[in-house]
Image (cartoon, helix red, strand yellow):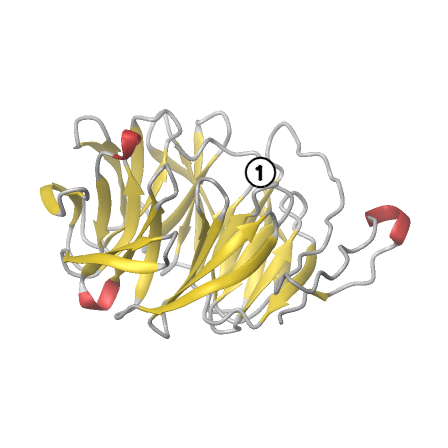
Amino acid sequence: MYTFRQLYRFPELALGTLLALITCSPLIFAQTPTIPTPAEPKIAIVLNSAEASVSLIDMQTRKVIKTTPVGKEPHHLMLTPDQKTLLIANAAGNDVQLMNPVNGELLGKIPEIIDPYQIGYSPNHKWFIANGNRLDRVDIYAADGANLKLAKSIKLAKTPSHIAYTSDSKTAFITLQDSSELAAIDLATQTVIWKMPTGNTPAGLWMTPGDQYLLVGITGEDNVQVIDWKNRKEVKRIFTGKGAHNFRPLGDKKHVFLSNRVAATISLLNMQTLEKEGDITGLPSGPDDMEITPDGKTMWVTFRFAKKVGVIDIPSMKLIATIPVGKSPHGVFFTPRAAWE
């Protein structure tokens, strides 16, 4: 049984009580304080993967106001379905930290989550996946709100990386970086239903509207592979730049950004025409994860090789500021933010 560990002793009147332990639920989260979400994001949260820390950035002054230690190799993060708790997956620390998504306050952690590299809830919030990038495994949890119960651990070689889902939450797709494959998992039975070859070192995944195509960032090459997943065949390649890696939708249900790690560019792709519309150039090395302000005008991006976070003006497609952070910055988050669609 996994038990939530409280990091601080919170005043009862200020934050309420912890959820009671429920014996049938292996993972229990803390009840988080009610802090209103601001109209505009105030603090950007950046994971420093090689420093086991999180940088908190004042988005107005664009300065780091605090660096907080967390578990080893924090790579990716995600909100719980109720939008109250930010989950930070510590791959080498074998746990998940819980953070207040508005002010960056650490709330506690869930221990013994093994090798959580990439994490994600299914669209219906009934399933939660943690990819074990280092240990070649995919752990599938049945989710009931914030309570998770391990349904099955699947060996899936080699190097499970990113996740995408069908909109009906029946199927999950996993890129396998070091075997250059794409796997499909039936969530109801927790079984691998097929695998197919991809380009060299697939990473980021994105499903186009209507579940029509899967977009795969081919990090070992210079393109996005468009896959008709229902027929398991490649439709085309969209050439973007070397090290094509990860996606962030603009929020208009038409465009998606793609970071090119090696080329140090970010491409804007049209999901309807399956064409590249432009590139953001002149960037520091290693652009990776991205987040967009709720007005759709500004994008924040981590530069893993440069130890910086950048601020990009979307209308002009220009870098307007950089902020030094820790080593190998990876995930970035703030709330509110543009829609992920």
In percent of width and height, residue 267 lies at: 25, 39
| Total labels drawn | 1
Q: In which quadrant is the N terminus drawn?
A: bottom right
| Residue shown at the point (40%, 29%) measured from the top left | 251
**Placement of the C terminus among the 4 image quadrants:** top left
> In the figure, 264 relative to 328: above or below?
above
Identify residue type, mark 1. Thr
Task: From this view, report whether residue 106 is shown above or below residue 292.
Answer: below
Is residue 315 positioned above or below 59 on the image?
A: above
- Nearer to us in this view, 122 or 311: 122
**What residue is shown at x 55% (from left), y 61% (from top)?**
149
Report whether 75 appears left or right of 174: right
Q: Nearer the viewer, residue 302 or 341?
A: 341
Q: Quadrant of residue 195?
A: bottom left
Horizontal and vertical percent for residue 81?
56, 43
Instruction: Note whether residue 261 is visible.
Output: no
Left or right: where 226 falls relative to 337: left
Residue nearest the viewer, comparing 74 with 194: 194
Label 1: state its secondary structure. loop
Residue 158 location in percent, x, y? 26, 70
Residue 304, quarter of the rendered image: bottom left
Q: Which residue is mark 1?
A: 335
Image point 57% across, 57% down: which residue?
Answer: 148
Q: Label 1 neighbourhood size at 10 Å, few (<14), some (14-19), many (20+)? A: many
Relative to residue 67, is residue 332 depicted above or below?
A: above
| Residue 49: % across, % down | 47, 65
- Residue 285 position by quadrant: bottom left
| Residue shown at the point (50%, 53%) measured from the top left | 77
320 to the left or right of 235: right
Is residue 91 among the parts visible in the rendering?
Answer: yes
